[in-house]
Image (cartoon, helix red, strand yellow):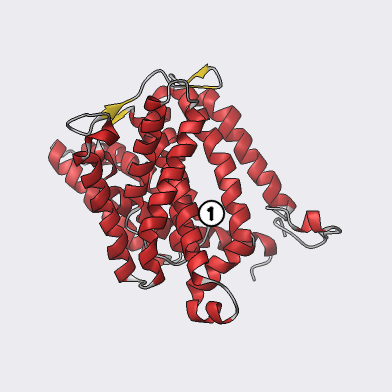
Amino acid sequence: MFYRENGQFKTSYHADQQIFPIEQDRWAILLIALFAVVVVPMVASDYMFRAILIPFVIMALAAVGVNILVGYCGQISLGSGAFMAVGAYGAYNFFMRLPGLPLVAALILGGMCATAFGILFGLPSLRVKGLYLAVATLAAQFFADWMFLRISWFTLDSSSGSVSVNSLQAFGIPIESAESKYLFCLAILIPLVLMSKNLVRGAIGREWMAIRDMDVAAAVIGIRPMYAKLSAFAVSSFIVGVAGALWAFVYLGAWEPAAFSVDFSFKLLFMVIIGGMGSIAGGFLGAAFIVVLPIALTRFLPWFSDLFGFEVSTAASSHAELMVFGGLIVWFLIVEPHGLAKLWATGKQKLRLWPFPH
């Protein structure tokens, strides 16, 4: 009974519409936010910021965006990397062609470019679904790769498609150190995640879930499939586009179209599947799994080989990391096909009854 919601009564509509209606959830989220904003910058090293924390924050934001489309609306997408690329190059063009434009405004405008691109390639969802829709969104990936590589206007006449930004600042504060980059990404992540949480709990979120569960029945009860599907593509593409702009501006600094290849799209889809589809927390859990596990394997495998006294080459170690990583993904999906978010929900259910066994 440690995690108990009995006795927490709501006496107003305002209280009943809270994002986190259970008091324990509110305290837990507050403590996690304080830990991320206050404690982490005090104890984390420069390596941890650059190798783990900044990629985790940006990938978690992108995974939340993909989860809205795939998990909540049920529209399979393999074009997330293209949406990130459009967001990155869109923000870059606004940032470079409009001198004095604030960085946050450039990120938002890049997200809006990704929104338009996502709606355009979301139109096939009105006629096809499942694997056919996945192929249609995969076409967006190939089109974006071709567009940013061959049309030099998008890259300010760079022949290779490679571009770079420097001397970033937001509200007069320079964003140069690893700590400032982490805090800036966190400042973008928190409002977008809260917005996503509100959307999926509201009327539009219920329309997305109705389309996901049975689109014909949803249309019969008055839900417009075109509006629901395209709005899911729009919101998802905006969040993924902002994440792509952050990935390019803050994490990479210099990038080319290959930085947002189809591998990126698959990686984001794996994050959603492993973290748990139809769960905002699943985006964070999946991003942590995908970002942290390869680094942990990089540290663990050399130690393991030294422990048993045999030498492993760098190439063999790299191949072993991929094999172990893929094996862990397969094993995990067999053990818990609903993702890490389901494990978290099961844990909360156990805490509701603790110390009783059932």
Residue 53 lies in what quarter of the image? top left
Q: Provide residue 170's location: percent of width, then percent of height.
A: 52, 23
Question: Which amino acid type corresponds to the residue marked 1 in the rendered image?
Answer: Ile
Q: Quadrant of the N terminus?
A: bottom right
Q: Quadrant of the C terminus?
A: bottom right
Determine if residue 311 is in view: no
Q: Residue 357 vs residue 125: left or right? A: right
**Secondary structure beneath disc 1?**
helix
Q: Please tell me which residue is depicted at 74% across the width and 51% down the height of the picture.
A: 23
284 above or below 175?
A: below
193 above or below 138?
A: above
Instruction: Tell which of 274 and 320 is nearer to you.
Output: 274
Instruction: Tell which of 252 and 229 is nearer to you.
Output: 229
Sort mark 1 into few (<14), some (14-19) or many (20+) by Cα contacts within 10 Å. Answer: many
Q: Please tell me which residue is depicted at 57% across the width and 73% down the height of the picture.
A: 223
Q: Please tell me which residue is depicted at 27% across the width and 32% down the height of the picture.
A: 155
Q: Please tell me which residue is depicted at 54% across the width and 17% down the height of the picture.
A: 172
Q: Which residue is mark 1?
A: 280
Q: Residue 323 vs residue 233: left or right? A: left
Q: Provide residue 157's location: percent of width, then percent of height.
A: 23, 29
| Residue furthest to the right | 11
